[in-house]
Amino acid sequence: MSDTADGAQRQLLQSLIVRLEKDELAEYTKASNFHYWMWHLCAGAAFLTSLVSGALASLISDRTFAAYGKVLLAALSFISAGATGLVSLYKFREKEALREEGRIEMQDIVDNAKSLLASCKTDDECGRAYHTVRERARVLSMNQHRRDIALRSDELPKADKV
């Protein structure tokens, strides 16, 4: 290996930082935002349709109810049940928390990688930094995957070993 940090290992570390920042970090941010908005949309829809159907049932006249009230109340009930089912089935709240945790950790990995890149003086140091950063990113991806599988299978996630 050369004594300067202008070699292949520095380039690998730079490429890894770009990939983690542009692809991985962006994906965690996108997933976190998606689950956040889906959770609020579905929970809000379920809540509001329940309120509206209760208000309609108590406020509409018997004649209006006979004409189209049954259909309207049934439709509102289906919307509420569907939104509640989506929240329960897809666990948007839990997945938002999982992806946000992943985003925070990935941001730390990227920041740490930039610091290591700035401080490495030789190609060997850059190589060690590259492998350290790559391993942290791999561990994060595996933990996120395992916890996502646990959410889908209703298993309790196992605590990470330190």
Image (cartoon, rainbow, N blue to C red):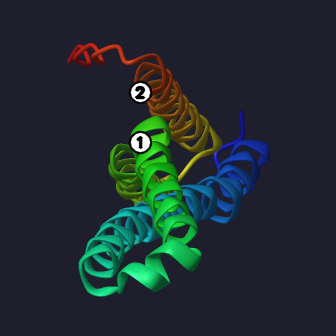
Label 1 environment density (alpha carbons within 10 Å; few <14, some 14–19, many ≥20): some
Most foreground residue, 117 or 62: 62
Secondary structure category for the residue under label 2: helix
Quadrant containing the N terminus in the rendered view:
top right
Q: In the rendering, at what x and y percent does residue 108 appear?
A: 37, 56
Q: Answer with left or right where residue 15 lies relative to residue 134.
A: right
The outermost residue toward the front is 63
Total number of numbered discs in the rendering:
2
- Is any part of residue 5 visible from this angle? no
Quadrant containing the C terminus in the rendered view:
top left
Residue 91's disc is: 1
Name the amino acid, label 1: Lys
* Res. 27 image quadrant: bottom right
Q: Which residue is mark 2?
A: 151
Q: In the rendering, at what x and y percent does residue 131 appear?
A: 57, 31
Between the C-alphas of marks 2 and 1, the distance is 7 Å
* Res. 53 image quadrant: bottom left
The relative height of residue 146 versus residue 55 in the rendered view (above or below) is above
Q: Residue at x 22, y 17 (%)?
A: 159
Q: Residue at x 46, y 16 (%)?
A: 153
The relative height of residue 49 versus residue 121 in the rendered view (above or below) is below
The relative height of residue 65 versus residue 61 in the rendered view (above or below) is above
Q: In the rendering, at what x and y percent does residue 57 appear?
A: 31, 73
Most foreground residue, 100 or 80: 80
Q: Nearer the viewer, mark 2 or mark 1?
A: 1
- Is any part of residue 144 visible from this angle? yes
Name the amino acid, label 2: Leu
The relative height of residue 19 versus residue 63 in the rendered view (above or below) is above
